[in-house]
Every structure is written in C-alpha cells, then in structure tokens.
Image (cartoon, rainbow, N blue to C red):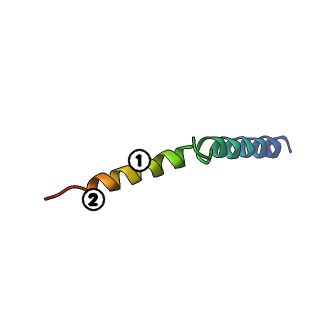
Amino acid sequence: MRNILITVMMLVVVALLFTSIVNNGTTGMRHNIQTHGNTANTNITSLTP
C-alpha cells in the first residue's frame, strides 16, 4: 500500500512539473520553441538564391 502511495505521489509531482515547465502560457518551453521555430521559418523563407 505504501509503495502505491509513493508511486501515485511521484506521478502527481511529475505531472505538475511538466505543466509548470512545458505548458506555462507565454513563458513555457512550448511557447519558446514555437516562437523560435516561427522566426527560423521566416528567416529561411526570406533567403534568396
């Protein structure tokens, strides 16, 4: 029973960390990757041969 409780608590902590780091609105990792990707795409498409 104790092992199950510890496992569930660890899963909750991991879920909260993921939410706070990756999906944190405008300061999260997902937003930063999207912004840099859009900038890279714009720079690549503006290149002239």
Residue visible at 80% across and 46% down?
4
Could you tell me how far apart the alpha carbons at marks 2 and 1 are, in whole angstroms? 14 Å
41 horizontally vs 49: left or right: right
Relative to residue 6, is residue 25 drawn left or right? left
**Residue under the image location 78 percent in, 46 percent down:** 8
Residue 31 in the figure: left or right of residue 11: left
The kind of residue on which mark 2 rests is Thr
Q: Can you tell which of label 2 and label 1 is closer to the viewer?
A: 2
Q: Residue at x 60, y 41 (%)?
A: 21
Q: Is residue 3 above or below residue 42?
A: above
Q: Secondary structure at mark 1?
A: helix
Q: Residues within 10 Å of mark 1 (few under 14, many from 20)?
A: few
Residue type at mark 1 is His
Quadrant assignment, res 28 = top right
Query: Do the residues bearing badges 2 and 1 touch, measured as CB atoms within 8 Å?
Result: no
| Quarter of the image where one finds residue 10 | top right
- The residue that mark 1 highlights is 36
Quadrant location of the C terminus in the rendered image = bottom left
Mark 2, secondary structure of its residue: helix
Which residue is labeled 2 in the image? 45
Q: Position of residue 40 (x, y in %)?
A: 34, 51
In this view, the residue in front, 4 or 10, is: 10
At x 74%, y 45%, the residue is 12
- Density class for disc 2 (Cα within 10 Å; few <14, some 14-19, many ≥20) is few
Compare residues 14 and 44 and report the one nearer the observer: 44
